[in-house]
Image (tube, helix red, strand yellow):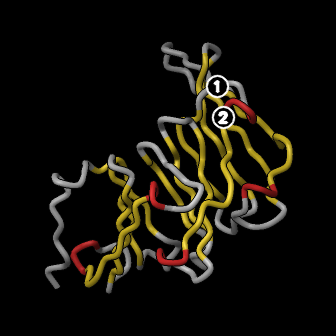
Amino acid sequence: GSGVTHSFESFGYSNGHFFNHDGTKLFVTLTNDVIYQYSLATAYQPTTSDSSTNVNLNTISGGANNSPKSGSISTDGTLMHIMDSTDDAICQYVMTTGFDFSTISLDDTLAANSHHSSPMKSFAFNGDGTKLYLLDNDDEGIKIKNYTLSTAFDITTKGSVLSTMALTRDFMGRDPEY
């Protein structure tokens, strides 16, 4: 199909996008704090979108997401994580019905200043959601911090740093040191 077409210029500009675990849903984050969710008939093929819904994060009780960027969603669609680039935090939203924005609420926020010393640049979960990886950089270089989650995809169950991998910048052609 030709897919659903949206012009975001009147709503804001795209800050990022992410897919659900099987590629049948595409999420687009906009600079005006709105997230669009597209249902895809063919996995990872945006041109096969046949419907869309959206949510303004500022209208969610307890939530105000400033300039949302990257994101992720749990395999069952009940936990969505959005990187808040203005406040340097990961916001965790819960949906009582998976992938249903009408049931969304803010659950928790993982702020950079309370969990590690430098600004977060991005984040990722492993496939089963039991590990959280935070990427940041400071005067010492780029660091990837690894946390274990006792409940899959739930940042409120994060323990202390399991490991830190430092990537050094070396312009002599050698591989980064881990």
Left or right: residue 135 versus residue 146 is left
Residue name at image x 40 percent, y 66 percent: 55
User: Which corner quadrant holds the N terminus?
Assistant: bottom left
Q: Quadrant of residue 139?
A: top right
| Residue 1 vs residue 102, the one in the foreground | 102
Q: Quadrant of residue 167?
A: top right
User: Image point 43% across, 61% down: which residue?
Assistant: 18
- Residue that carries the numbered disc 1 in the rendered image: 118
Residue 166 image point, x, y percent: 68, 28
Up the image or down, 174 lies above or below 78; here it is above
Q: Quadrant of the C terminus?
A: top right
Location of mark 2 (residue): 112
Mark 2 or mark 1: whose residue is earlier in sequence: 2
Name the residue type under label 2.
Ala
Looking at the image, residue 8 sits to the left or right of residue 35; the answer is left
Residue 64 locus on image (x, y percent): 51, 49
Q: Is residue 26 left or right of residue 108?
A: left
**Residue 88 in the image, given as x and y percentages of width and height:** 56, 36
Dividing the picture into quadrants, the one containing residue 110 is top right
Task: Please state the horizontal and vertical placement of residue 30, each as a whole percent of the image.
Answer: 33, 52
Q: Are marks 2 and 1 in contact (CB under 8 Å)?
A: yes
Q: Nearer the viewer, residue 165 or 38?
A: 38
Amino acid type indicated by mark 1: Ser
Element class at badge 2: helix
Which residue is painted at 67% across and 60% down in the image?
A: 107
Label 1 crowding class (10 Å Cα cut-off): few <14, some 14-19, many 20+? some
Q: Select label 2 or label 1 by which is in front.
A: 2
Q: Is residue 67 left or right of residue 124?
A: left
Q: Secondary structure at mark 1?
A: loop
